[in-house]
DNA sequence: ATGGCTTATAGGATAAGA
């Protein structure tokens, strides 16, 4: 089974490019992030015409996650257990006035069982800045996900946690680590929250097969980042113990960043035996 | 060329991204 994750940065803008990728890549399951639309706006018919079932979870123009599969799509979940919510208004307000009003859930996780694998398409919160409420939200989100992931691993489930993790795990995963000093994505708490999945028994499959330094999955739209190869490695696939041994390879489709109308992220591919 | 941000929005200044 070929499993791909791709932050498409608007599915409505990118649908032709995504369908062309599916057509040529042999993808069985595509985990999509940043669809930037509501469920009723998602181009479901185009995916179905290409032979894929789709589950999408989108609440507004922000975030939005989906799974497209041609090997089955069952038991869809639009959040993981204890997934925290976030609201700017709530974050800005006096905590004492919030009492026990829970911040709303964001569309950042969707899970489905595809071809015998429990696939989660994940869009980890950005964090915005160290000390920002969104940064605390990011760490809490990752901690809750790790707790859930540990229970799945302990149950022996074949789980793929694949998506845009918004963490740069190593200094060699960024064009210039000095440029990110004091910013999000590289802070020790974020890196620890990411590596905690390894401590929970998971294996990051793209690192296993693509260990070369300065291997990127994202290039900013600004300042000629792609022609200058000023990229980041932030899209990953963590596999549970029951799944990791089935991995046979990984690839990053760098060519997808070329040309007009590219997303700022490229597809990240892993191959799994049945 | 791989080229100096891009996307969405009760619709154009703002929020968000990394």
Image (spheres, coloured by chain):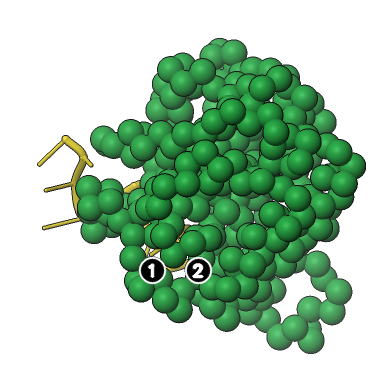
| Residue at the image point whose x is 45% and y is 52% from the top | A233
Chain A representation colour: green
Q: Position of residue A13 (x, y in %)?
A: 42, 36
Q: Quadrant of the C terminus of chain A?
A: top right
Q: Position of residue A87 (x, y in %)?
A: 66, 67
Question: Residues at badges 2 and 1 in contact (C-beta under 8 Å)?
Answer: yes
Picture quadrant where residue A101 is located: bottom right
- Is A6 positioned to the left or the right of A121 in the image? left
Badge 2 or badge 1: first in the primary sequence: 1
**Chain letter behind tag 1:** A
| Residue at the image point whose x is 29% and y is 37% from the top | A258
Q: Position of residue A116 (x, y in %)?
A: 77, 25
| Residue at the image point whose x is 79% and y is 86% from the top | A96
Q: Which chain is yellow?
A: B
| Residue at the image point whose x is 54% and y is 73% from the top | A187
Q: How dense is the environment of label 2, judged by Cα within 10 Å: few (below 14), some, or many (20 and up)?
A: many
Picture quadrant where residue A174 is located: bottom left
Kindly identify which residue carries mark 1. Answer: A177
For the residue pair A134 and A204, the one nearer the viewer reads as: A204
- Is A233 positioned to the left or the right of A105 in the image? left
Q: For the residues marked 2 and 1, what is the alpha-carbon distance in whole angstroms?
A: 8 Å
**Chain letter behind tag 2:** A
Kindly identify which residue carries mark 2. Answer: A186
For residue A12, say whether it is visible. Answer: no
For residue A18, say whether it is visible. Answer: yes
Tell me: residue A101, above or below residue A247.
below
Tell me: residue A225, above or below residue A273.
below
Picture quadrant where residue A21 is located: top left
Q: Position of residue A179 (x, y in %)?
A: 35, 71
Q: Which of the labelled discs sits on residue A120, or is there none?
A: none
């Amino acid at each position: 089974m070929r499993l791909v994750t791709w932050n498409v940065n608007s599915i409505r803008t990118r649908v032709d490019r995504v369908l062309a990728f599916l057509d040529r890549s042999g993808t069985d399951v595509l985990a999509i992030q940043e669809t930037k639309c509501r469920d009723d706006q998602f181009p479901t018919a185009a995916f179905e015409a290409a032979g894929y079932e789709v589950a999408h979870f989108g609440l507004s123009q922000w975030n939005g996650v989906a799974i497209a599969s041609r090997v089955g799509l069952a038991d869809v979940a639009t959040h993981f257990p204890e997934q925290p919510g976030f609201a700017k208004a709530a974050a800005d307000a006096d905590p004492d006035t919030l009492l026990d009003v829970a911040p709303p859930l964001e569309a950042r996780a969707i899970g489905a069982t595809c071809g015998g694998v429990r696939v989660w398409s994940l869009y980890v919160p950005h964090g915005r800045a160290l000390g920002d409420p969104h940064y605390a939200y990011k760490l809490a989100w990752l901690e809750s996900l790790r707790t859930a992931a540990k229970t799945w691993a302990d149950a022996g489930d074949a789980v793929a946690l694949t998506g845009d993790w918004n963490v740069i795990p190593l200094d060699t995963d960024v064009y210039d680590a000095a440029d990110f000093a004091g910013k999000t994505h590289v802070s020790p708490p974020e890196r620890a929250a990411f590596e905690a999945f390894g401590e929970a028994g998971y294996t990051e499959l793209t690192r296993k097969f693509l260990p070369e330094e300065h291997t990127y999955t994202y290039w900013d739209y600004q300042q000629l980042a792609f022609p200058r190869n000023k990229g980041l490695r932030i899209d990953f696939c963590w596999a549970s113990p029951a799944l990791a041994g089935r991995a046979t390879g990984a690839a990053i489709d760098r060519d997808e960043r070329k040309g007009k109308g590219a997303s700022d992220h490229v597809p990240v591919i892993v191959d799994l035996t049945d």
